[in-house]
Image (spheres, rainbow, N blue to C red):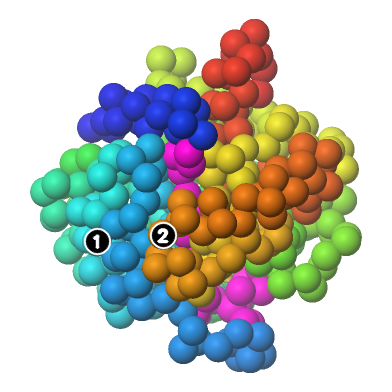
Amino acid sequence: MLKYHRIVRGILQGKVQRLPYRLNISLTNVCDSRCKTCDVWEIYPKKRFNLREELTGDEFRNIFRRLPKSLMWISFSGGEPHLRKDFTEIMAAAFSEVRNIAMINIPNNGIKADRCVEDWKEVLAIRKRPYVFISMSIDGPAEVHDEVRGVAGNYESATRALEEIQGICRREGNAAIGIGLTISKFNYDRIMPFVRQVLDRNIPLKIEAASTGDLFYQGRDSGERPDLAHAGIREVVREIYGMQKRKQWRWYSPIDFLTRNHVRGAMRFLEDPSRLVIPCSAARSNYGIDCYGNVNPCFFYTSRFGNLRDYEYDLMALLRDNSEKVAKARGEIKQHHCTRCWHICNSIDSMIDRKLTRPWTFLDV
Ligand code: SF4
Ligand code: SF4
C-alpha cells in the first residue's frame, strides 16, 4: 500500500521548509539498447564521459543518508539500471537510508530479462520498503519496438520480463509494473493496435512524447525538436487519452488523477512547445542528480549547481553553498528560458505544487 501519510508529510514539510520532496537520480549511463529516441547508449562508446567516474554503491548510500526528511519520492533512471552489478544493494540502501521514503519508480528496457527478473525478486522481497513502480519500456508491437529500440528480440524479452515481474509484484505486494510507451515520429502511426491490447489487458500504461534535452540527447538535437513537430503525435496522444479515460483511470485514485492530468499537459505542450504548460518545480521541489554526482535542476536543463563529491554527499549543503546559482536557475525556469519540457520526471510535482498554492487550478492541469 502506498503510504499516503508519508507522501503528504513530505510534501507539506518540503513546502513549509522549502526543501525538495522528490529527486530524479540516474544510476548509470551504461545502456545495452540502441534507441532512436535517446542517445544515452552512445555516451561511453563515443567516450563522452568516463565510466569510472560513475558514483559507487557506497557513494549512493552516503547521498541517501544525508537527504532531508521531506524526501519521500525518488525516480531512478539510467541508462539501464540493471546493468549495474550493485543494483540490488543500491535499492536496499535507498529503502533503509532515506528516512521518509514512500515510493520509488524506475524504468527497465527488458533486454536482459533474466537479470531484471532476478533483481526484482530480490528487491521486492525486502519487507521494509516503499511502494515500487516499475515501467517496462515498450514502444509498440514487436517489429516497431525492435526497430525503434535497435535491438532484435527486445520486444520478446521485455514482454517476458513484464509478465514474470507482474507475478512477483502480485506475490510481494506494495509494487506494480506497467508499460512505458514513448511516442515519437518513429512509431506514432503504428502503435494504436498495441495500445488497445495493453488497455484490454488492463496493464497500466504511461505515455510520453519523446523529449530532447541536455542529458537525453547530449545536445545532438538541441535547439530543434524534430519529434514534437509531427501533428500525428498530438493526434495519437489525444486518442490514447480518450481510451485511458474510458478504460483505465479510476476517478477515485489520486495517482490516476495526476497521470490523467499529465497526459492533458502533454497535449497542451505539444500544441506549443515554446512555453511551459504550468510553472515548473525543478530546482525547488525536485532536483536531478546524474550518475557522476552532479546536481542539476532536472535532466533536461543541466545548469550545473555542483558535484556531491565536493560536499561530502550532502545535497542540502551543496544547494546552500550554491544558492546564487540555484536562484538564477529558478529565475530562468520562471521566465521559460530553460530547455522546456513536459515530462513525468517533473510534471507530477509541478502539478502538486500548483494545486497547493493555487487551489482554483485543481481541475486544470
Ligand atoms: S531510452 Fe533508455 S533504454 Fe533507450 S537508450 Fe535511452 S537510456 Fe537506454
Ligand atoms: S520545464 Fe524546464 S526546468 Fe522544468 S523539467 Fe523541463 S526543462 Fe527542466
**Residue ID for mark 1:** 93
Residue placed furthest toward the front: 321
Q: Position of residue 314 (x, y in %)?
A: 41, 59
Quarter of the image with the N terminus is top left
Residue 358 visible, this orientation: yes
**Front position among marks 2 and 1:** 2
Quadrant containing ligand 1 reads bottom right
Point 61% across, 46% down: residue: 283
Amino acid type shown at disc 2 = Asp
Q: Nearer the viewer, residue 300 or 45?
A: 300
Magenta-highlighted residues = 19-43
**Residue ID for mark 2:** 314
Distance between the alpha carbons at the discs numbered 2 and 1: 16 Å
**Picture quadrant of residue 334:** top right
Q: Is residue 238 magenta?
A: no
Amino acid type shown at disc 1 = Ala
Point 87% across, 43% down: residue: 274
Q: Position of residue 112 (x, y in %)?
A: 37, 75
Residue 234 visible, this orientation: no
Q: Position of residue 156 (x, y in %)?
A: 43, 68
Query: Mark 2 CB in 8 Å range of ligand 2?
Result: no
